[in-house]
Structures are given as C-alpha cells and as structure tokens.
Image (cartoon, rainbow, N blue to C red):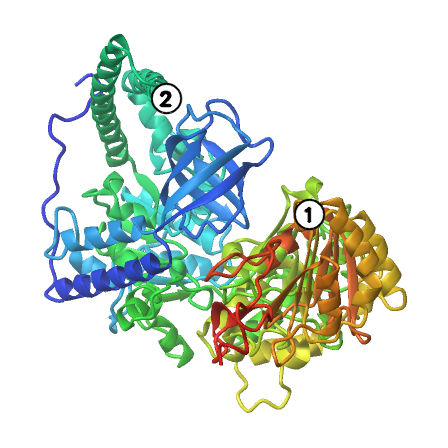
Amino acid sequence: MSLGLPAHEPLPPIGPMSPEWPEAARKAATALRHELQAVTKRRVQTDVPLIAVAGTASSGGRLRRFEAQGEIGAAEGTRATLIIRKQPFQVEIVSVFGSVVTLSTPPDVPIVEVATLRVDLSWLLAEQSRRLGELAQGGPGFNAVAALAVVTPPKAVAPIRFTPPIGLAGLNRGQQAAVQLALTSGVTWLWGPPGTGKTTTVAALISELCARGKRVLLAAPTNAALDVAIQALLQRRSDLANGALVRIGQPADPTLTRHVLVEEIAAKRGAPLAQRRVEVGRRLRECRKTLDSLKQRELSPTEETTRLRLETEIAELQALVRELDGKLGQVRRQVSREATVVAATAHQLALEALKNLTFDVVVLDEASMTTAALAMLVAGAGSGHTIIAGDFRQLPPVVIADTPEAQDWLHRSPFEKAGIPQAVTKREDPPRLAALTEQYRMRRTIGDVVSIAFYDGRLSTASTATTRAIRSRASWAKAELLVVDTTAMHSRTARRQGSLSRYNLAHAQLIASLTSTATTTARDLGLITPFAPQARLLEALLPEERLENWAASTVHRFQGGERDIVVYDTVDTGRGVSPLSRWFTEGHTGSEGARLLNVAASRARDHLLVIGALDMLHHRHAAIRNPVWTFFANLIDKATPIPWQAAVSQGPTEVIEDDLVDRMRDDIKRATTIDMWLPGRSLRVLPLLLPELTALRVGSPESEPATLWVEPEPDGHLPLEALQARREGINIRPCLPILESSAILGDVIWSASNSLLSTAPGVVLRTEHRAFADAARRAQRRRPGAGAPGSGQLGDDCGRCRRMLIRYEQDPRGRTALRYECSACAR
C-alpha cells in the first residue's frame, strides 16, 4: 500500500481470437521444441572460463565485461550463473561481441579477475514454447488477430488517407511518407536498407505516436539494437526520460540514461524493499559461508546445533528473498504499466516482466533478425496497429534444427513468413510497404556496389555521404573500395577439430600487417569475417590502445553497426577445406550467402577492403549471375587492387623466401612451446631442425613442449624424417587429414601454401605477435577424444604391428569425425 501498488494486479480481458490462431501457435511451439531438441543434442549446459576486461567493473555497478575463453553459444537475454570462488550469482547475458561478454549482475557481485559462466542454452527456447502453449486458446490482453497479422501475406487495401503528422523535422520525403503510413492502423512493413535512416524514422514515428496519446511497445531482438533505437528517440524527445519511457532489462550501452531503466525507477520507488533485499542477501551469503566451513570437518554437538540453526535461517531467508523479489517485480510491472513507451528485447514478451501488459501500438525493430514465432508474441501485445521494421535482405534469425517446422517458424522472420521479400523480388510491392531508398552511410562507390548487387539498384547515395570529412585514415586506403586478391598466395583454409567453421592463418597474417600500419591514424575500424574461428584470430590483432574504437567479429555480430574502415576477410580459398562454403556458392536473392556479404559490405562508411581469392570466389563465365556473383564482378571492376605482397611490406608479417631454415632455428631457440602441422609427406627440412628441437626437449623433461603433427605414408608408417625425429625424442603425431601447413614457435607464427618443411613450401609468411600466436595455438589445438590423445600428449603404437596409431579427423565420406586406429590393422 505504501508503494502505491494495487491490492490485486488488474487483469485485462481476453483479447480478440482468430480461428487460425490455435494451429499457428501449435506449429510455432512445435518448431521451438525441435530447436530445443537440436540444442540439447549439442549441449544443454556449458561452463565457460572468463577473464575480466580491465577497467570495466566498478564497485556496486550492474554491468561486468569479461573475455570468454570459449564459445558462449547463448542468445542475449539468456539467464546464466556466474561462479566466483565456488559461489553462484544469477546474471543475464547483455551482449556478446567477439569474445567479450557483458553481463548484468547483482550489485554485490565481487570484482574479480577470473570467473566461470555457466549457461543453460535451452532456457529462452523453453520459455517461448511455454508461453505459446499458454496462449494457444488466447489469454488476458493477448490479441491473437494482431499476432497472426504479422505472419500472414497482406491483402489489398483501399487507398489510405493520411493524417498530417507534426514534428517531422530532419526527415527526407521517403522517411516522412513512412511515418505517415505507419501512423495508420494495421500492419506497416518498414523496409530500411543500410544507412537509410530507419532508426531515425522509427524514433520520429514513436515521438508522433506519443504526441497523439498512444501507448507504445518498442521491441528489438538484441540489447544493442534496442539501445540504438532508445537513444534516437531520446534525442528527439528528451522529455520522455521522466518515467514516460522505461527500458526493461539491462542495456548494452552503459551511457543510456538511468532515468529510463525500469530497475532504477523501480528501485527508487521501492527503496525500502530494495534496501531490505540487499540486507537479506548479505545475511544469506554470510550464513552459507559459515555453513560451508562446517562441512569441512566432523561436528561437535554444539556445532551440530549451529548447523541446524543455520540451515533453518537459510531456508527462511531464501523464502524472504523470493517474497521481496516478487514485490520488487510488482513495482517494476506497475512502472511499466504507467509508462507511455516501454522498450524491451523481444524475448521479454515471453517472460513475466511484460506478461498480460497491453499497448496501443507495437513497433518491432530489426525484425529481420526476429523469428516469426517470437514476432507473433510481440505483436499480440498490441491492438493490431503494428510496425515491422528491418531489412529482409540482411541476416535472418539463426537456427540449428533443420526440420520443416523450425525452418518455417524460426529461420524465417515475419517478413519472409508474410511473403514480403517474394513480392518485392517480383516488383509487386505490398500496399503497406514503406521502403526507404536514400542512404547516408556509405561513400558512393561502396553504396553503388551494394545497391546493384543486393537491392536491385533501388538505393541512392545522399550528397552528404560524399562530402563529409574523413575521420579515419590508413596508408593503404587510397580509395573507397579496395581489394587484396590472394589467389596467387594459394593460402590454405583450415577448421577446428569437430567444427564446420573455418579459418585462414595466412589471411590473418596479412591483416596483421595492414592493421599495424593504421594504429595511429584509423580512429574507427572493423575487421569482419563470416567464420567465428577467424574472428577470434582477428580479435587477437586489435591493439590495446584501440580496443574502444576498433572491433573484430563475425558478420552476425556486426549487423546493425558501422565503421569508418571495414576490412572484410572472406577466408575461403578452396585449398585445405573444400569445397567452398555455401555462403559463396549459393548466392541467390534471399540466400544466407547474399545476406552475409550484404551486411559485411554495408558496414563501411568511408573505406571497404575485401580480402579473398577472387579466382575461386568469382567465376567470370558463370551461368547464373546472382547477387554474390554480381558483387564480386563489380568489386573486380571498380575496386582499387592492392597486391598481397604490398599488404605485407610493413608490419609484423614478412615473406620468407631464402633463409627459412636459419630463421626457424632462431625462433625455435627462443621458444618454450612448439606446435607444427605438416601436410603431405615431404619433410626434407625437418632433419636440419632436429638439434634445436631436441635441445628444447632436453630442457623440459617432464612435458612435451614440441608436438609435430604429420601425415603418414599410405601404408601407415611414418615418413623417414618423422621417424628419425621420433627416435630422437620429438613428439611426432600422425594425423589425417592435416589441412594446415603452419608452425607456432613461441610468439611466432609461420604458414606456408605447401608443406612448410618440404623443399618447395610455396608462399611462406612469418609473423611475430604474442596475442596472435596464442590465438592461433588455441585455434589449431587438438582436443583429446575417441581415445585419441590431444596436443602436447604422446601418441600410441599399435599393439599388433607396432605402427603408430593415426588420429583420423574425417570419416571415409569426408565428414568431420574423430577416430583413433591403425591404418593397417583396421582394414
């Protein structure tokens, strides 16, 4: 009563129902169950070691940033457990960018250097499936008609009479027309290609809706996308930061004003409850710590009494915590119920925070990244006045399951489910489609290539994009569009054991030199690649002094962002891992390959540099000329070429042509750990390095500091040079196939287009870079499994024929698989 909460929370009436809704809800829930099963087969729970990012934690703060020492694999908004000194804390994953994860934590989480994140990968899927099950026959405040409308092909409508909006300053004609359309009831499809001001348009629309007394739900699939939209709205309507705009959940943007965070508003309103919750939490931890100390020994009768008292108090405190959390939750819901604009990530509509709350208008931003199933839950919170904003030519939602239901309801966004892209491709734009066509981000050359390849030439470049000042410079960025053709390098593509994703060590070495020459002049730079292992290599190249403004990650993580200079590493060359990824071979309109390339290229403001083996990526005489083909054709025609030799002429990477043996000897002498991957069976140079390798072995008698992975002869025997090295105590490990041709000698990375220790190694690159070497070592490290020892461990001999057992990493059909056997005795 003192907090102004109602005795009983008001429950809205059951919303409008559609005869088709129960079947649609059932199919969407089935799709979620299939995805849940697919996730469970991989792993349901995972523990990831974390290292704190310096300078990002403050006492009593809510956000903590860590560098993950493994794959997080969980979506933003996922609840997780942060384990610090064996003590668990409930946290939420706010964002994951590259290997840096931002967590929303309780204010009393201690500041530490290391921790472990325990993630339940199934939680969000289970919550969405449960919520759809609850609403299968409708529910309080849920509008099933509005939910179905966003996944149903739009019908022809009568001409729309616009009400002239007010306060549309700063919008071009196309943006103004989009706002006018979106102010009318029904579903509006707002198509905003990159740089066209979609966020500005959405902010102007919501501002106008507020002026008309409408209550608005603003949703987006990620915290970062939601924060961008909120900041744009606050720039237009700063007066909303007085409680009229509330943001559910912790933002990825730490600068977002505290006056809009529901946690902050509710904490102020419910200060007595919040203070009591802190006190109870502190006492609960004290009791658990004392109880843990008693578990370490046999107890006296007095200590047994103490144990029983502590257990009783802990149970009572836990019940009180649940009660206090429930009351604070009611305060947060009341704050949301009173707000004019509620901003939340889309998955919050499946959770308790927004359950049964209703809105006049629903705006779903970045909807192309939202599943059709989740979009229905979001739209169902409104009256049927819904705006679906995004770009269906960019990346779709990520899904693991390959069942028809999962592909239909989870891999497709509401745009695809409603048939909007198909209509646009046929030049039959739906009547309620508002298409923005003037872009302000990319310089004209970049914008033209993106427009022609991915938008049927619809995009035009605003004059301001061609006249603005250049903020970031690099000595090699002589033009807006640049390309490094690595065809002549014959670089090898590899992949981590058990993974379909891939990396290219030579490309990363090339980028190491490019970035090193731009450190002092490039204010803003992004390194982008389609493949996660390559992204981790590129991330290791970021200089310490540029971590705030430079970034390296996958294309998926970069969607929605922009950089002055973008370096796009295609990775794939067709050598090593083959064939090419379907992202380069399946490039039709709407394909994932076309979308990935579109997102990567359209992040660039001033300069776009593409690195790739163009002879493999672009076939000049291809019969089918799809968007991916068109992009590379225009790239070859319009981009300024940079010879790959020029790209490595400065910086930490050098081309080794004459003194390979002497340089490798020097590196081995300085190294404490050595890993080599040697494809083929030509190892003529290996005997020349044995004195240095054996000296390293003698220096560390209790470990295996040097491991050499080699391909055996067809009969299963080791090549003669490898056999000699093994006799001298070197850890030789036979493996098939070996896709890499590289060596990591302490802090130095070597790569070759042919076998590194053969008499004809091809193009050989050497890079001295400690962080990069550590990342490459992690990327290429073999894990134990299927009875096979991993990196740094000794191999075994066959018990029958005495040949060494071979680590096979593919099955006979070329699929990724691991087995450990003798090639002769297994026949």
| Viewer-nearest of discs 1 and 2 | 2
Numbered disc 1: secondary structure? helix
Figure quadrant of residue 263:
top left
Residue 727 drawn above or below residue 295: below
Three-letter amino acid code of the residue under disc 1: Ala
In this rendering, does residue 58 appear at all?
yes
Which residue appears at 57% of the width and 59% of the height? 782
Q: Bin the neighbour count of mark 1 within 10 Å (Cα to Cα): few under 14, some 14-19, many 20 and up.
A: some
Residue 32 drawn above or below residue 704: below
Of all residues, the one furthest to the front in this rendering is 800
Which residue appears at 47% of the width and 63% of the height? 436
Residue 345 drawn at (x, y percent): 36, 47
Residue 720 drawn at (x, y percent): 74, 73
Q: In terms of depth relative to the viewer, which is nearer, 574 or 354?
A: 574
Question: From the viewer's perspective, is 213 left or right of 616?
Answer: left
Residue 597 drawn at (x, y percent): 55, 68
In this rendering, does residue 458 appear at all?
no
Of all residues, the one furthest to the top in this rendering is 302
The number of discs equals 2
Which of the two discs, 1 and 2, labels the residue nearer the N terminus?
A: 2
Numbered disc 2: secondary structure? loop
Question: From the viewer's perspective, is 287 left or right of 563?
Answer: left
Q: Which residue is labeled 2 in the image?
A: 296
Question: From the viewer's perspective, is 758 left or right of 593?
Answer: right
Residue 610 drawn at (x, y percent): 67, 67
Q: Which residue is labeled 1 in the image?
A: 771
Q: Which mark is residue 118?
A: none
Q: Please state, as top left, top right, bottom left or bottom right, where the N terminus lies in the image.
A: top left
Residue 183 drawn above or below residue 332: below
Q: In terms of depth relative to the viewer, which is nearer, 252 or 106?
A: 106
Figure quadrant of residue 712:
bottom right
